[in-house]
Image: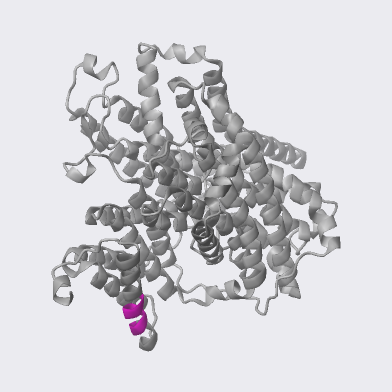
Amino acid sequence: MLPTRDRTGPAPDQDPKSAADSSLVHRTDLVLTAIILAGCGALYYMTTTFEEVSLLLAQNISPEFFPRLLLWLIVVLAVFLPVEHRFLEKGRQGLDKGRRERIKAKTVVTAGLLGGTVASMPWLGTYFSMILVCLLLPLLWGERRLKVVLPFAILFPTAVALLFTQVLRVYFEPGIVGPVFH
Amino acid sequence: MEPMLEGLALLADPFNIFLIFVGVFVGVMVGALPGLSSPMAVALLLPFTITLEPVPAIAMMAALYCAGTFGGSITAILINAPGAPPAAATALDGYPMAKRGEAGRALGLAAVSSISGGIFSLVIFLLAAPTLAKVALSFRPPEYFALAVFALSMLASISGKSSLRNLIAGAVGVLIGTMGIHLTTGVERFTFDLPELTEGIEFVPVLIGLFAVAELLKQSQTLNVAYERVTSVVIRLPSREDLRKVRGTILRSSGIGTFIGILPAEGATVAAIMGYNEARRWSKNKDEFGTGTPEGIAGPEAANNAATGGAMVPTLALGIPGSATTAIILAALIMHGFRPGPFLMKETPEFVYAIFGAMLVANFMFLAIGLAGAKIFSRITLIPRALLWPIVFTFSMIGSYALGNSIFDVWVTLVAGIIGFLMLRHGFGTAPLVMGLILGKLVEESLSQSMIMFDNNWLKFFESPIVVLFFALTLLGLFWPAGVRVHAMISARSGRRAGDANTAK
């Protein structure tokens, strides 16, 4: 007789990891699928708000036809995501390799800093925004040698600004404080 | 013959040669730095080439593409950290050989295999591109639609965590391509009431975000990773004995790499993996693989560089990108006012030959640069990441801004970067999204034109044998890997059951 398995959890001699591997649905991917489906739903709704045109003008291809076709395709593909790990050679572990670790606070702060830099561009101008990111990002990433960071934060953006404005004739956003330094 | 000479004459300008050198130098450097990749570098370079003439602009990008693939092998061999994904297979034997104290030999083998693969693929490029373009001249919208669908289906088999995720990313890319005004009706789609989106989303800021900013955020997760490095390297050309050992492998891998490169969407990474596997399969010393055998270096290196020339064939002859980097080169061609595809070969063949010449020159240049500067390039990994990535972000910011002097584009870059980071985390490749984005317009336009031609009758697609062939290849491409996997699973299960039954007896 073949051994039976307790339905409430892994057998005492069974590795919990392999039990997770054999589960039918991958929870993280289930959430991912829900997000994708919700996004597709929202976009599908948007296609219903597209301006209506006569079929004669659209030559039988209405503007919402192709996006809807794609949305349906994404939905059909996304439905398989939660069970996909069962068909992969490396299984669940292969999929989870990059996301096992939580998103670090440093990454979130980095994204925030980059966002802040872009937001500051209209006011500070391109040059000072470059200085800002070249000063704060190394400090945030643990570079504590100020005698390296400070010259870098000033010299690199200055060299880039000179190269791009004088040689490549790229226009730099002057910002509100820019004219003061002109 | 005349267009070829004209094309090579275009390159003879010292300024163009200088730009090719810059492309090669930057390519080797970027390839050698873990985290930086040639698609990222080409994407960052793109906005600054607007002011250049088309020939030097595209030649520089093509040179960077070739050199970046080779550059990845330097750090793969010396610090076991492939500078670029195509070099991952090189590390399997390159690093053990370097650890044995033969780093120079490993680098020499990588350089010679790379240049051999590169030149082999360029010869095929020279022969295949005009022929393919001639065939493609007879293509009508239905054939183009089928070809584009086939190219998108190939995303299922490009490297990455899963075929399914690659396909979803590709479809999302095509969907993003539908943003803006619908050409046939003039209706605005997915513009979110933002006037900047009326004409659709700009390729370049999205590409920069997906390749540069996403990688920056990924790097912020791994700041504590340290590399063990092999120092004091003097690169040396392979001995006659080594060359005798690897010549068959180089030839085979060059063929594989070129073929994989020509297939739409398949790039150097897949070619390198296949090159390595085939080198092992055909080798008499299979057991030595993974311990630092010359064939284990020559196989992937010849294949990944051969894929670069191969990938240019569909890009230039059909307007279908052969890899992520060529997708960006395709965007650059469009930006410079060219129409990639058969008409490019027909109307401006000298331009295509100039790109061929640039890639050929680049192959010799990276050999020279590799021989002279391997020691320097092995040390560039000493640049602290805390200083390197602000440089990347600065260029991302200026690059996306310079395109249209618009801060909105910089926001697009940032948002694309954050989305790209989350995608990578959950196993969705950014390269498939880029391919979808680039091919999106072609897919929709050719579908619309076909449907108008066929008076909305889908069945008429199947009247063209070329369409049927592409659709058949699409189905094969989509279901073959899944079929093989399911078959393997069923075999394994039945094997296990048989084993259990025997145990029970």
Q: Quadrant of residue B441?
A: top left
Q: Is residue A182 above or below residue A35?
A: below
> In the image, B98: left or right of B357?
right
For the stretch drawn in magenta, the main secondary structure is helix
Q: Quadrant of the N terminus of chain B?
A: top right
Q: Can residue B503 be seen in this snapshot? A: yes
Q: Can residue B475 be seen in this snapshot? A: no
Q: Quadrant of residue A170?
A: bottom left
Q: Quadrant of the C terminus of chain B?
A: top right
Closer-to-camera residue (B486/B204) = B204
Closer-to-camera residue (B385/B351) = B351
> Where does residue B79 sit, x and y in percent of width and height?
62, 71
> In the image, A125: left or right of B29?
left
Q: Is residue B417 above or below residue A125?
A: above
Name the residue located 37 percent from the left edge and 57 percent from the top edge.
Answer: B48
The span shown in magenta is A150-156
> In the image, A64: left or right of B436?
left
> In the image, B332: left or right of B185?
right
